[in-house]
Image (cartoon, rainbow, N blue to C red):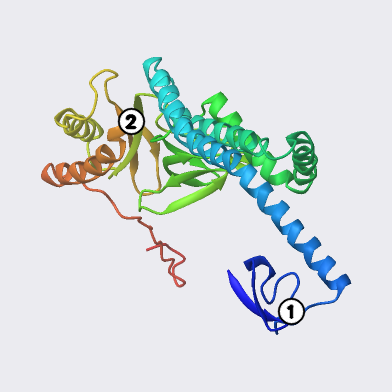
Amino acid sequence: MKYFNICNATVNIPDILTPGNILFDENGQLVGPSEAIDNVTNWWDKLDLLNKIIEKIPALIIAIILVFTGFILSKLISKLIIKGMKARNIDPTVYNFINRAVSVVIKLGFILTACSLFFNIGSLVTAIGAAGVAAGLGLQDSVAQFASGIQILMNHPFKNGDYVEVNGVQGNVADIRFMNTVITTADNKRIIIPNSHITTSHIVNYSAEDIRRLDLTYSISYTDSIEKAKNVIRNVAELNEAILSDPAPGIYVNSHEASSISLVAKIWCKSADYWDVYYRMQEDVKLAFDANNISIPFNQIDVHVKSEDKGQEK
């Protein structure tokens, strides 16, 4: 309580009527009638707003609980969906995509439900739909990327971990996202390719089959024995445990070059062993040729010199 001296009498005034409030200004002087009415009106409006806020506190608490529950539930449902897909041996490439999509849908649903506690979300949904149409027109490329991502997951041209070639880029598929696909090259560079570029390009999936064939070319001199060279290459292939015996390696004469005879070795291995077999064969065949005196000739040019005096070639 506050006390003021009015007409030589000490009178207690409620706090609400103290200086700076309804009946008194900041200096403790009585205000005029119109100003007092305005002060009362403002005070009542503030009191009404406060009451409204207090009334909304339970709804606010429920909204917070709903949003929190939505985030927790989205994680649980995503895990259950992924567990079910694993039990049915569904392509692991789909896991992350489905996980993100389910999480977004569930979270958005709970957020809209929380908003419905405070206002009619019908108009909000309509506004979101209209904004979505407008955004779709302005973001046609992004929509195309998303649609291409769905197409990749539906058609399964590759999966995570596959070694592929897309748009001249070779590497392992690291991740398939909504808008793009991440490829890690052999020298550990990360390349991000828009999904629409992938669906409109030629895709070479080197991991699609369990085994691959290597076509390796070796040159020998015209003076070397073709049969001996073929046997040397065959023996090297048979000693390499990563090369398959079925299908059996095939060694053939590929072509007659200007300075050499070209032999081709067609050998099979597991797709995962391709590059190991390639590099090892290149080294082992060279060492085997050296040990068996089989030469790998350089380019040769025969030069004929014509004598001007006698008109004869030398």
Residue drawn where x is 58% and y is 42% of the image: 60
Q: What is the secondary structure assignment of the residue under circle 2? A: helix
Label 2 belongs to which residue? 271
Q: How far apart are marks 2 and 1 (CA)?
A: 89 Å
Q: What is the secondary structure assignment of the residue under circle 1? A: loop
Mark 1 crowd level (few <14, some 14–19, many ≥20, 10 Å Cα): some
Question: Which corner quadrant of the image does residue 310 belong to?
Answer: bottom left
Q: Which residue in the rendered view is the most extreme toward the top?
A: 88
Q: Which mark is residue 25?
A: 1
Q: The disc labelled 1 sits on which kind of residue?
A: Asp
Name the N-terminal-most of marks 2 and 1.
1
Residue drawn where x is 44% and y is 66% of the image: 306
Residues tagged 2 and 1 counted as in contact (Cβ below 8 A): no
Q: Where is residue 119 in the image (x, y as percent from the top left)?
A: 73, 39
- Point out the image quarter for the N terminus: bottom right
Residue drawn where x is 66% and y is 66% of the image: 16
Q: The disc labelled 2 sits on which kind of residue?
A: Ser
Residue drawn where x is 84% and y is 72% of the image: 35
Q: Is residue 61 left or right of 31 when viewed as pictured?
A: left
Q: Is residue 199 shown to the viewer in this render?
A: no
Question: Which corner quadrant of the image does residue 86 belong to?
Answer: top left
